[in-house]
Structure formats: structure tokens, C-alpha cells
Image (cartoon, rainbow, N blue to C red):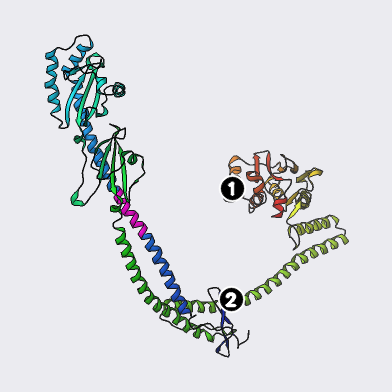
Amino acid sequence: MNETSIGVLNLKSKGVGWWFFYMQKGEWTELQGKPGRYNSLRNQIFVGFVMVMLIVLLLAGVTAYDRVAALLKSNAEKHIHQTAVQASGRLDALIAQVNSLTAQVADDSYVQRLLSDEKHGKPATFNQRQALLQIAGSYQSFINGAQSMEIYTTGYNRIFPMDDRSLDLRVERSWITQADEGKGRLVWAGSDPEDPGVLLAIRRINLLEHSFEHGGYVVVRMQRSFFQLNDSNEAEGLQDSILLLDGDGEVVTSNLQINLDPKAILDSGSVVQNGEESYIVVRHRSELTGWTLAVLTPLGETTEGVSILRTALLVSGIIGVGLFLVMSFFLSTMITRPLIRLMRAMRGAQPGAMRPNLMVSSTMEINELNDVYNQMVYRQNELTRVVHEKEVMQSRAELKALQSQINPHFLFNTLEAFYWSLEEKGEEELALRVIAMSRLFRYIIPGPHQDEWVTIADELEHAERYLNIMQMRLGERMQWEIRLSEELRSVPIPKLLIQPLVENAILHGIENTLKPGKVEIHVEPSSVGRVRVKVQDNGPGMDDERLLSIVQALDGGPAASTKGTGVGLINVHRRLKVYFGSQLGDAAKLVVESEVGRGTIICFEIPRETGAAHDS
């Protein structure tokens, strides 16, 4: 790209690409396609804002409508449930009164004695039965709904009132059986066959002084009006209907103003239909009587506020859309105007002469864009400078690499020259030491193409060269032995794992004793798939305190050596963990054993197959 052509501005709108302008000699010319006058960025932003607003208003309105409608219905259901709970509580209180009444009659001492005599063959006299009238009347006065009370013997004979009527002719045999099974529990037997406006309840009387033997029955006749539970609050406009059904589905009491089948109310769901009118039904079953209390509320009461809500949402939505149209127009204009100014300000940018733009805008975002552009200019100039410096540094690094290749080469050639000079002068032993030192350095100083991994045979050969050099200094004071089976010669091992251990054995073992010392290197198979390397000396050995300090140094503590740098063992220990930690785990370490007067043994294990470690 030359100075007369900066680039092409590619704008895309709704998947259709237009190339608008091409800058040439500082002027904008239309390159391809001519969009309509209404296809401007401002109009696109305006339409986009309006569409987003409409979608948001629609979703918000629908969500609010659903949530509020559900809330109104939930509140109505809570009110109905509360009404049902309150009515059920009043019903249980009425049942408790009847239960208390019959229990007091059954436990009355005179009734107990009279029924006990009857059970033991002493029929009650006329005067004794007449006395029951006063007892029954005294108890009935406590409950307004108790119409009358009846007492029967175990043979179903009625002793009060005094008409000798049989109990099994008064109520069905099944209710008597339930009363017997209840053993003193009050059982509601439904409507009185002789008076539909009266309900019957039966309780078995247990003789307290005769081990709760069966002594007879007490039957109470209760008026249906006693269970009237109508609690409509006309001041609050509540229209709840309360229906009380017994276990057979018959109506006990009701204030229902509509014609509905009671069994349909029991079997229906939460909503029951009566023509075009729907009712919400809440049912509550009494555990004391087995009766079911049903509360019905017209469904229209729960949704009467929904229509008002719908109108309010519609009006507010129309007003919101109108206001947003005006605001969107002004907002789109405010956004696009600074962008056009920024485009004009950036025309002066030329390739090869990147200069920062000093435009100042009243819009924070445009100023941020301008700052980003200026930062890009500064960064590009900085990258250009850094690239240049890296090229210079790379040239210097290549030069140093060439020099580093020359230095070892010079050292090896110098040692070779010493060797040939000593060979010519007949100093064969000294010449062998020099050539051994040359080969030692060649092994230690790696070349650019040498691998870090060698075979155990190569590593032991290097250790042997080191021992030869050290024997020249120590003479007959040092002996050494290397044992390696033929099958282990090709096992791979990293460089310089064995020689530092040999050096440690000489430095801390052989040199610290006056008697002849010996260094032994044993390489032998260990457990399945492993090779054990052991370096042993017969030096003075170490006490427990000294041995503990060395173990702590290997685990990361301070160097424990008092002679030399003390980093040889630590270096080997850490390299073992790096190379073989993933394969051997905790076994990838140096193991040091020593005893005063008997020398020191240092050993480690490596896997026979180390392809994974070598590849890494």
C-alpha cells in the first residue's frame, strides 16, 4: 500500500457488505455500491434501539402480567386456605365439646355403677333409671346443640330414656362395631333415621373399676345447626361458601347457594365447574370425625384485578414506546456524530509515518477510542524499536555461540599438543594422564550435537578415567574396582550421575584415612525392571549426626559438606528426581549408609527402560 491509498473501509449491515470509500490523495471516493439514503448508521442504530425496546417491553409486559396474575391467584388461594383452616379449627372445637360431653357421661360414677350392676345381672330399678334424667340434663346444658342423650347396656337395651328400645334398631350394626373397635372413642353415625335434622354420635362406655370392661353405650343426638360454619364477611365482600360432608358424602351443613353434587366436589380437582361459573375448591378432612370441609370461592374474585392490570400495562407500554422513539433518535445522532469526526481526524495517518492523533471529544467513549488509537501508534513504534534491538542481540548471540565453540576446541587441541610433546620426550605415563584428562574434558563439556544421555558403560568409562587421574595423585593409597555385568552395559543413564559419587568417596573417604583405601563401583540388577548403582569406600565413615545432616541437605536443607562445595550429592539427588520421579516415585533418590570405621555406601536405582524420560 502506497501513500495515495490507505485502505478500504468495509462496513457490514445485516449480512450485506458495502465498500463505501476509498481514500486517494486525501479525498474519499465511492468505490462500489451506493446504499440508500436511509441505510445510514444513525438509522440502523435507531431501528435497532426501537426493536430492542419493543422486545423488552413485550417480554417485560408478558412476564409482569403472568407474575402479577399468578400472585393475585396465589393470594386468593392463601385466603381460601386460611378460611378452610379457621373453619376446620372451629369444627374441631365443636367436635371436642361433644367428645368431652360424652366422655363425662361415660365416666360418671352413677352411670358406671348402674351399668356395672346391669352387666352383673342386677337390672336397674325405675327410680334408678329416673335419676339418669337429672344427670343427662345437667350435662346437656353445657352444649346448646345437644338435643338428647341415650344410654344402652351391653345387650343393646336402652335404660335411658325408659322405653326399652334396642340399640341395633336405633343405628346400624356397623356403627356399633366401630364403637366397639374404638374402645371408648366417639364415633359419628350420620343422620338420625327418625329426624334428618339430627346427627348421631355413639361411644362405648368402659367400666373403670372393672379393668375397663365393656359396660354399655352412650348415644348423643346433635342438631345439624350446631355445626353451621358460615363465616362470610360481607364488609370485606367475601363470598366463600362452606360445605361440610360426612364420610359417606352426605351434607352435614352447608351455606352453598348453588346446586352442586357433593360427591363431585369431593372428587374434583382444585377447580369445579357449575355451568359457566368456575369455583376454586379447598378441602380439609377432619381426623376426629372423618368429615370433609370444602370451601368454594368464585374464580372471578381471584382475577378481577387482572383486567385492570392488563389496561395499565398497555397504556404504560404505549407511553414508553413513544418516549423511547424520541430518545433513540437523539441518542443515535449523538453516537454517530463523534464517529464521523473521528474518521476525519484519522485521515492524516500514513503508513511509515505513524503519529498520534490529538483530537479531543466531549464523548468519553470517543476519547477512549482515540486513546486506544494513540496507544496503538506508540506500541507499533515501540515494537519496531524492540525488533531492531532483538536483531542486534541475535547477531551478538550468534557471535558468542561461535566463540563458545572455539574455546573447547582450543582446549582440546592444546591438551593434544601436550600429549604429543610428552610422547616425543618419552614421558609415556604423563602423556597417558594428559590424554585421559583430554578425554575427561571432552566428556564433561558437551558439544552442540551431543546427547545428555549415555550408556552405563560410557558413564563407568568416564569414572574410570577420573580414577586414573586421582590415582596419579594418591598413588598406592587408593585402589578401585568396577563391576558391571554385560547385560547392563547398554542401559541408558544421564551424564555425570556416577562420577560425582566417586569424587565424594575419594574426597571424604580415601583422603581422610592414612591406610590404603578402596573405592568400589557395583552396577547390578535390582528389582524387576530396575538397575542398582552402588559406590562404596572403606574410609572413616560418619556418625549418626553427620549422616542426618547429609540426609537433611538432600531433602532441601543447607549443604552439609565441610570440605568442598557440597553440591555434588545434592545435584545428583535432584537430577534423579527430575529424570525418574514420574517412573520411580519416591524411589528416585540417593540412599546414603555409613558407619564409623567401616566406610560409606551411596546408591541409587534407575529403570532399565527409560524411553519416556529420554524423550522428554
Give the x, y percent position of residue 137. 12, 25
Q: Is the residue under label 1 in contact with that under label 2 (CB below 8 Å)?
A: no
- Within 10 angstroms of label 2, few (less than 14), some, or many (20 or more) residues? few
Q: At numbered mark 1, what does the secondary structure look like: helix, strand or loop?
A: loop
Q: Is residue 106 above or below residue 94?
A: above
Q: Is residue 289 above or below residue 394?
A: above
The answer to whether one can see residue 499 in this image is no
Mark 2 is on which residue type? Leu
Residue 418 is a magenta residue: no
- Is 44 in front, or is 130? 130
Judged left or right of residue 230, residue 561 is right
> Residue lying farthest top?
121
Give the Cα distance between marks 2 and 1. 45 Å
The residue where tag 1 is placed is 555
The residue where tag 2 is placed is 383
Q: At numbered mark 2, what does the secondary structure look like: helix, strand or loop?
A: helix
Q: Upstream in the sequence, badge 2 or badge 1?
A: 2
Judged left or right of residue 498, residue 75 is left
- Is 256 in front, or is 56? 256
Give the x, y percent position of residue 377. 54, 79
Judged left or right of residue 277, residue 357 is right
Q: Residue at x 58, y 46 (%)?
A: 552
The answer to whether one can see residue 442 in this image is yes
Which residues fall within the magenta stretch?
65-77
